[in-house]
Amino acid sequence: MAASPTGAEPQQAAQALAPWLQTQLQSLLTRRAHALLLQGPSGLGQYRLALGLAQAWLCEQVSEQGACGHCTSCHLVGSHGHPDLAVLMPETTMLELGWPLDEKSMDEIDAKKRKPSKEIRVEALRQVVGFAQRTASRGRGLVVLVYPAERMNNVSANALLKTLEEPAGDTRFVLASEAAHQLLPTIRSRCQTHALLWPDTSTALQWLQDQSVGPSALADSAVAASVLRLSGGRPEDALALASHGPDAAQWARLPKAVAKGDVSALAGFEPVQAVNVLQKLCHDLWALRVQAQPRFFLASDLPTPPGPRALARWTKELQAIARTAEHPFKADLMLENLVSQAQRIFKSTNSPETAKQA
């Protein structure tokens, strides 16, 4: 859907798909469904795959491999200005990914009348419903891309439902979700679903290193391996985590530094990311406690785990903090509190209670 370029600067060319996404794209292009739901955990490439699919549907010289990348339609998609493509996202996501907001919304945000929405607004959904009734400008039909689809509330989802069930003319939908269980069952039932495939470790590591620009930390294979492990094998999450720039030695020292109360171990982290890392540390300490293999850190980098009661208490505390981590009063104070909390948990290792539990 054409929009004035008022938000962040749009990208001028669509990025090449990662190998594991390219394979899935070719398979999805053989499907004839009017609505596809791409689902899976974060970090596997839902958005990139959805955009690649939308671009291929609109491409003037599409092949079995996908969009040509050179025609006028592909350039319009790459510049985020194709008149036959509507993107439905939270305003925060649109700004982050370089999609332009409508002029009214951008004026309100620029004037500090409100903050960008983290949900898909029903006003934007209604615009898309109107868009779906139009005639395609370039003869390849209309495409609606919804990401992350779980950010629709019940009002937004119900507004989309009728159009999704009975699309007008040649309109196709691609919904991408990192939490498909949160979607209305009626939305899921009207889409063909595709579960995102996980890349093998060697493919993911090679892709991560290919993203390195200049003296990027990811050029170090040990750092790439560390962030991929810490991201649970999810390449895009690993790429985001690598933006903090620590080297392999810093990643390795993080668990024991947190246990000692060293706040610098989380320097540069946003509160949400810090909570996520600490939840992974807590998970791996549970694994050690029950003599299982840790998933996110190397066993040699982990401190002695606290007792089960202390770990259970820490698990609940981190879960409670995670619910409000996006709205901290002051980020640096929150990081200090998180490390102080972790230090208290680890100190309980030497308590009489823990000794009985061991």
Image (cartoon, helix red, strand yellow):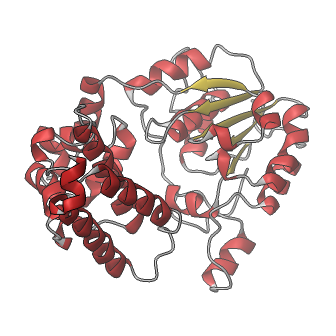
Q: Residue at x 84, y 55 (%)?
A: 155
Q: Is residue 341 above or below residue 18?
A: below
Q: Residue at x 51, y 55 (%)?
A: 97
The answer to whether residue 277 is seen in the rendering is no
Foreground: 271 or 235? 271
> Residue 211 at x, y = what percent?
28, 42
The answer to whether residue 342 is seen in the rendering is yes
- Snapshot quadrant of residue 136: top right
Foreground: 249 or 128? 249
> Residue 233 at x, y = what percent?
33, 34
232 on left or right of 56: left
Foreground: 260 or 1? 260
> Residue 271 at x, y = what percent?
38, 68
Q: Residue at x 91, y 34 (%)?
A: 168
Q: Is residue 235 above or below residue 193?
A: below
Q: Residue at x 37, y 37 (%)?
A: 234
> Residue 191 at x, y = what percent?
75, 28
Q: Is residue 356 above or below residue 325?
A: above
The count of marks equals 0
- Snapshot quadrant of residue 253: bottom left
Foreground: 206 or 56? 206
- Snapshot quadrant of residue 339: bottom left
41 on left or right of 58: left
Q: Is residue 280 above or below residue 140?
A: below
